[in-house]
Amino acid sequence: CSSCLVKLGRPKWRKFRLSSDMKSIEWISRDKGKDTKVEISKISKITFGQKTQKFQRLSRSDVDNRSFSLWYTDREGKSDTLDLVCATDLQYKTWTTTISKLKRRSVPKSIIDSLANTSNNLNLSAGPDLLAASTKHFNKYEQALQDVNVIYRFGSNTWGHTKKLPHSQSNNVILFLYLITTGQLGGKNKMEKSPVLLHIQGSYDINEIDGGWSHSLLLMSDGSLAQMGRKIATGFDHDVSSPVLIDVNLVEGSVTEQASCGRSHNAIGTDDGKVYTWGNNFFGQLGHGDRMDRKTPMIVELKTQVMIRDIACGYDFTCALGDCQLFTWGSGKYGVLGHGDEKDRLSPCLIEDLDSITGMACGGHHVLAWSRKPAELVYSWGLNSSGQLGHGNSKSAFSPRLIPTFSNKHIISVACGAGHSLAVTFTNESSLTYACGSNAFGQLALGQCGQGAKVLTPMAIPSLSTGLRIQEVACGSMHSLARSESGEVFSSGCNAFGQLGLETKDRFLNRFTAITSLKDKNPRAIACGGMHSFVMCPKKWIKDEEVTNCMKCKAVFTFMRRKHHCRNCCLIFCNECSSKRIAILHLKLKGPQR
């Protein structure tokens, strides 16, 4: 099987193939008059996008999402790159996935076979200036995206931990993401007060998303990771307003499974129980034993051989859970690390007072953790100025303390904000949602709110206790979301930046209110950043009024530039972009379709 790709430095079409033993990538070099190859074992890493020196000389932003580079060692022992541009998104996804899995020696035969289906009969005798004139080739052979994710955005952009989103049940499920945010998280620098569609270019199925102070992380189903936002947290040299894939040099065989954002640092967890961190490290929140910032993910060394299964980032600290043990590091202010003092920890330290922990949630300066066996218990510690720990007082706790309200109650969801906490319990076929902490902006949805308003002991939220079965809650800095089993999403709290997703001029709401624009979207998961919110929904036909720009060329729709729906990906394009039609074979349509 073979595929035609553009090869740099002097751009030219070449037919690439895998060797019969699948140990090397081969192509015919017209310059050398013979076959040339790169052994898979010699490839040290794969970078996505146009980041190498060869690409920088001939940078083309319109094909950046179909470009990748293979870093390898040549016969003379020198480091070199093989820089390639694919003709289609499907071709790009197939090649990058196959090479990545071959490096881990875990590629399925079905993926190898699919390479044959991405071959294109392209002109192989084109000259050196091919890349400069290759737009017509890419347009001609561009295929409809197989797995497209789009984001609806509303709100602003400050720190706040978000709950991770569940994995898709099928690779064929295309998910929409409704996002309440501003430009740092993938749109123009303006506030949105209702869900606005944001397109993520490329063949990606989102598994998880998390938001920080002014940035976000997106984890794809294939383990790839994308960032967007301010440079202080992303490691980029400039702010990025749309998702950009980043290089994660994992241990061979590892796959990223989860991601979390702090105020200005990030953490990811892999399937083999490893933790990687990068970003700001002023308080040691990266866990590398020093206070040096990192621009790229670096593995965290644990003192014991523990398989980490869950991670969460707070304001300037990090938590990792493995083998029912909880490790913390970073800023120790207010006792948030749970070690009985306020000292910073520059590397992971085990909380000795806890065992049998099965989950945790991080707020700004506080943590909630819960256990299942031998009894269902919930602990909390850290800052308690507004009663967010649920202990019945406003005294901070430097070590874990039991929350009596939740003893022997089955916990199904917990979330923490800057100064408040939410928890959902399930008993006798019904659920109860509890809230405690600051209610200054109505984020507890308990009615009365205002400066100094606080709830010291968890209270059930009346508006969510009348026949609704709440499955999930999420907290931003000063707002809250809740999702019901029937697919409704409710929001409450501060709305200064439109983070509630409600078309209202009210600066805050003190009761949970349904987001009507999401009524028919069948939401699957919710999450919050500091002043922004996320809602993940399955693929559905997009309404005309939800889109103002072509989702490929970004041109504004006008009376002359009309909207055209794609039957394959459900996205909306202008006439010029939608004229590039192909047969949608997996829908049994043999003829070209818009």
Image: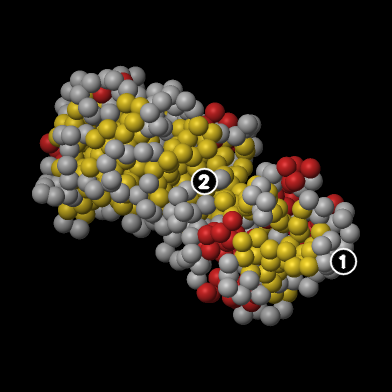
| Position of residue 414 in the picture relative to residue 256 (left or right) | left
* Image height of 480 relative to 489, above or below: above
x, y percent for residue 418: 36, 29
Does residue 594 appear in the picture of this structure? no
- Residue 366, how many percent across, how many down? 29, 29
Q: Identify the residue position indicated by label 1 in the image.
A: 125
From the viewer's perspective, is 383 left or right of 194?
A: left
Q: Is residue 348 visible?
A: yes
Residue wearing tag 2: 248
Q: Front-most of 290 and 358?
A: 290
Hey, which quadrant is residue 527 in on the image? top left
Q: Give the image location of residue 305, x and y in percent.
A: 28, 45
Name which residue type carries label 1: Ser
**Label 1, label 2: how far apart the Cα atoms are:** 36 Å
SS under mark 1: loop
Q: Residue at x 27, y 41 (%)?
A: 304
Q: Which quarter of the rendered picture does the C terminus lie within?
A: bottom right
Q: Residue 573, relative to residue 352: is it above or below?
A: below
**438 left or right of 393 in image:** right
Task: Give residue 404's quadrant in the image.
Answer: top left
